[in-house]
Each structure stands twice: as structure tokens, then as C-alpha cells.
Amino acid sequence: MTTNRTTPSTALITGGSSGLGRALARRLDQAGWVVVTDARDAGRLHDALDGTTVHGVPGDVTDDDHRAELVEIVADLGGLDLLVLNASTLGPLPMRPLSQYQPADFVEVFRTNAGAPGSLLVALAPHLLARDGVVVGISSDAAVQHYETWGLYGAAKAALDHVVLTFGAETGLTTYAVDPGDMRTPMHQDAFPGEDISDRPLPESVVPHLLALLERRPESGRYLASDVAVRAEASA
Ligand SMILES: NC(=O)c1ccc[n+]([C@@H]2O[C@H](COP(=O)([O-])OP(=O)(O)OC[C@H]3O[C@@H](n4cnc5c(N)ncnc54)[C@H](OP(=O)(O)O)[C@@H]3O)[C@@H](O)[C@H]2O)c1
């Protein structure tokens, strides 16, 4: 993403203490962006951002006060160029057929993966619109395919896609639903307990594709990260 302004670009990435959120936050920080991120575990968030200038804000994205705090921080920073709705939950573990979830599980997974990020997006819209900003909802292949035991998570990811892309259509904001593909992260290990996941790519390998998307800025829509070509020097 390029900007003609003299001020650096500002990003808010939810879930920055691990996995893809951490990798993207650290990469944008290196590139000179002002980056804000959050996570529930304050100690892990602090450690994950060690050696960076990323603003780590402990909190749960489903908490109204925490989201209000994030919006206030963005206002204090003077605006927002990029919102990455990355934090999410698989729901109760182990993942299970839909018939084995409790009603409260449905509420919690939809709240975390779609409701709270949708509310954050709406609250931040004035800041994003003022900067012609970009929104990236981190999706999953489970949002469009129907694997046994992935139904609740996948349905909530489909809801996030719908919220993000519809909001783009309603407001003119550039919005993307991006499937990052399998990544070697704690969430992925939770989904495959006891399985060796060392063959899955690290989340750092997805970041150049996200940066290429931001740089190229194609039309709003759903993208597979690996389909967004990376210039050779950008992937180095
Ligand atoms: N890994 C994969 O193979 C894969 C595949 C497709 C899509 N995805 C998607 O990619 C995104 C990143 O996943 P990942 O694998 O990188 O996960 P991860 O390594 O488990 O990291 C998740 C991050 O989100 C934070 N988080 C979780 N719930 C939160 C909440 N309620 N409020 C604030 N922060 C919260 C976690 O910190 P705390 O726990 O301390 O809050 C952590 O920083 C997710 O949207 C996931 O659905 C992952």
C-alpha cells in the first residue's frame, strides 16, 4: 500500500501475539508502519512484540470496552489505513460435529469470529474512509467448503466474509476476505491435536502475499493468499 501523505501508514491487526497476526505486525513495523495490535494474554502479547515499536493493547475483541479503547487509540494516532480482522476462535476443542455443540458455543464462535470484528469494522469505518483505507478479514477454506467438524468455525468465517465484503459494497471501502491457507501455528495445532504439523508453512510465508495484495489493491473480494503473486524481491 502506498501513500502520498508524509505521515506513516497506520494498521490495526487483531490477534497479534501469535501466528499470522504477530508475523504481519512485526513485518509492517519493520517497514515503518504505525501498528496497533491486541490479544487477551497480556504477557504473551508483550513478549511477541519484543524489539518492535508495535502498540500492544491487551484485551478481548469481544469486549465492548476493549473495542472502544482500540477505536480511541486509532483516533489518537490520527487515522487508519489498514484494518486486519485476524483474531478468531475454533470454538471448544476438540472440534466436533455440529450436533455436539451447545447453544452457547454457537453464540461464542459467531460473536468472536464475526460479530465482534464486524462491530469493530463499523466503529472504525470513519477513520478508514477518511484515509481510503483497506480492510482484510482473515478467512479460511472452511468458509466455503464443508468439512466434518469444521462447520461451526467455517460458518462463522463465512459470516465474517459476508460482513466484510457487504460493508465494502455499502461504503465503497476496499475490503478483502483472505484465506491464508494452512499455517504452522498454535491454532492449527489445536485443530489437529497430536498431529505433526511441521510440514505446514510458517505464517511468515503468507505475509508477502498480504503485502502484495495491499500494494496491488485489486477490486474488493475473496482471495486465496497464495494466488496473489509476490515479486521475487518482496518474498526474500
Ligand atoms: N493456522 C491456520 O492453518 C489457519 C488457516 C486458515 C485460516 N486461519 C485464520 O488465520 C487467523 C490467524 O490464525 P493463527 O493460526 O495465526 O492463530 P494463532 O497463532 O492461534 O493466533 C491467534 C491470535 O489471536 C489472538 N486472539 C484469539 N482470540 C482473541 C480474542 N477474542 N481477542 C483478541 N485476540 C484474540 C490470540 O491471542 P490470545 O489467545 O492471547 O487472545 C493470538 O494472538 C485466524 O483468523 C484463523 O482463523 C488460520
Image (spheres, rainbow, N blue to C red):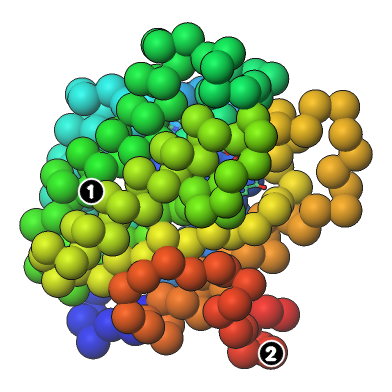
Q: Percent position (x, y) of residue 88?
A: 48, 36
* Residue 59 visible here: no
Label 2 near ligand 1 (CB < 8 Å): no
Q: Percent position (x, y) of residue 150?
A: 60, 35
* Residue 110 visible here: yes
Q: Identify which residue is drawn at 41% across, 21% down.
A: 106
Query: Which of these two is toward me, 222 or 231?
Result: 222
Mark 1 burial class by Cα count in 10 Å: few <14, some 14-19, many 20+: many
Q: Give, as a three-letter code, the residue at label 2.
A: Ala
Pointer 2 residue: 232
Indicate left or right for 162 with 41 as reference.
Answer: left
Name the image quarter holding residue 165. bottom left
First in sequence: mark 1 or mark 2?
1
Q: Is mark 1 on a helix, strand or loop?
A: helix
Query: Which of these two is toward me, 9 or 180?
Result: 180
How many numbered marks, from 0 up?
2
Indicate left or right for 19 with 37 as reference.
Answer: right
Mark number for residue 121?
1
Residue 8 versus residue 87 in the image, above or below: below
Indicate left or right for 143 with 127 as reference.
Answer: right
Name the image quarter holding residue 118. top left
Q: Identify which residue is drawn at 72% across, 80% down.
A: 236
Q: Give, as a three-letter code, the residue at label 1.
A: Leu
